[in-house]
Amino acid sequence: MARIVRSAVIQTKFDGSGNDSVAQVKKEMTDKVVAQIEEAAAQGVQVACPQELFVGPYFCAEQNIKWYDLVERIPDGPTTRLMQQLAKKHQMALVVPIYEEENTGVYYNTAAVIDADGTFLGKFRKIHIPHCNPGFWEKFYFRPGNMGYPVFQTRYARVGVYICYDRHFPEGWRALGLGGAEIVFNPSATVAGLSEYLWKLEQPAAACANAYFVGAINRPGTEGPWNIGEFYGQSYFCDPRGKIIAEAPRDKSAVVVADLDLDTIRDVRNVWQFYRDRRPDTYDSLVAP
């Protein structure tokens, strides 16, 4: 019997302004995502992931300490607790990308992973932190992740997470595959003109190279007042052969649902023996300073 996991990637348009209060922005975006999770639940979704830093705009478009007010403890913060309640209510595993406070002044771009009974399984902290023009000033807000590349055994599948800029680094994709990931979610915030030509190239290539499913999530629309570019949406799932099997529009909120047949992973790996034919004994230079 096929192992089918109904999964969702969730993109959410920010209709407010970066000039709004942090509390107002957080409430509006959280309410939107909760409604989208409910929509996913109505379609029988078992595993879901919203976009990067979903409780606000992509605030890294500026360097402003007011956005430090978005930080929360994980798992003891309000958003993780809310998502645990939703996970238990809908028997849905959730990947929850939020702004984490470890200690005062020590902040990470993080995704909490919650199982279908509401259990907090652990977290992934974004490893690679960009700081580049136009408007991706992430080193102002985040320390680099320090928890490696964990894979989480949920009720339905073994899930990995790689966040936005991480996707440009193939080593982490491979580490997640070696760790047993069957679905890797990549919540992102990326704009047209900068990396759109890579959007449907890198994640399918990673899925193919590692023979697992990838759920790629991007924001839709233009966010004021910064207007650093159009977040072009087009969240999607691709299969272990690198084929895109479900996709969102570019300019509006959407819940993209796909049935992922995890048995495909074995089928593909039995043909393409990349894991068998690896030569780690020749890779020392890849980890040289």
Image (tube, grey):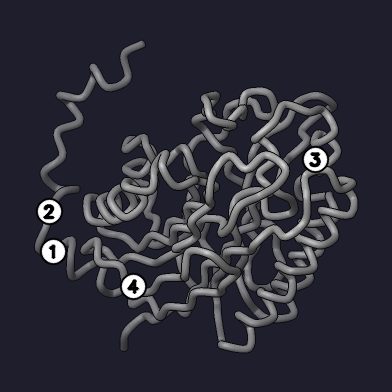
3 and 4 marks in contact (CB < 8 Å): no
Q: Label 3 to label 4, Cα distance in Å? A: 35 Å
Q: Which residue is mark 2?
A: 273
**Residue 145 visible to the viewer:** no
Query: Element type at marker 4?
Result: loop
Marks 1 and 3, how far apart in space?
44 Å
Q: Nearer the viewer, mark 1 or mark 3?
A: 3
Marks 2, 3: nearer the viewer: 3
Q: CA distance from mark 2 to mark 4?
A: 17 Å
Query: Label 4 amino acid?
Result: Leu
Q: Nearer the viewer, residue 267 or 128?
A: 128
**Residue linked to disc 1:** 270
Q: Quadrant of the C terminus?
A: top left
- Badge 3: how crowded within 10 Å, few (<14), some, or many (20+)? many
Which residue does the numbered mark 3 point to in the structure image? Answer: 71
Q: Quadrant of the N terminus?
A: bottom left
Residue 137 x, y percent position in the rendering:
61, 27
For discs 3 and 4, the disc positioned in front in the rendered view: 3
Residue under the point 90% across and 50% down: 23
Whether residues under marks 2 and 1 lie with C-beta atoms below 8 angstroms apart, the answer is: yes
Q: CA distance from mark 2 to mark 3?
A: 43 Å
Q: Give the mark nearer the N terminus: 1 vs 3.
A: 3
Q: Identify the residue at horizontal 29%, vertical 56% (top origin).
A: 204
In front of the other: 212 or 27: 27
Amino acid found under the numbered disc labelled 3: Val
Say what amino acid the circle numbered 1 marks.
Answer: Asn
Q: Along the polypeptide, which appears first: circle 2 or circle 4?
A: 4
Residue closest to the eye, 115 or 199: 199
Q: Which residue is mark 4?
A: 262
Report the Cα–Cα distance between label 1 and label 4. Answer: 14 Å
- Distance, label 2 to label 1, CA atoms, is 6 Å
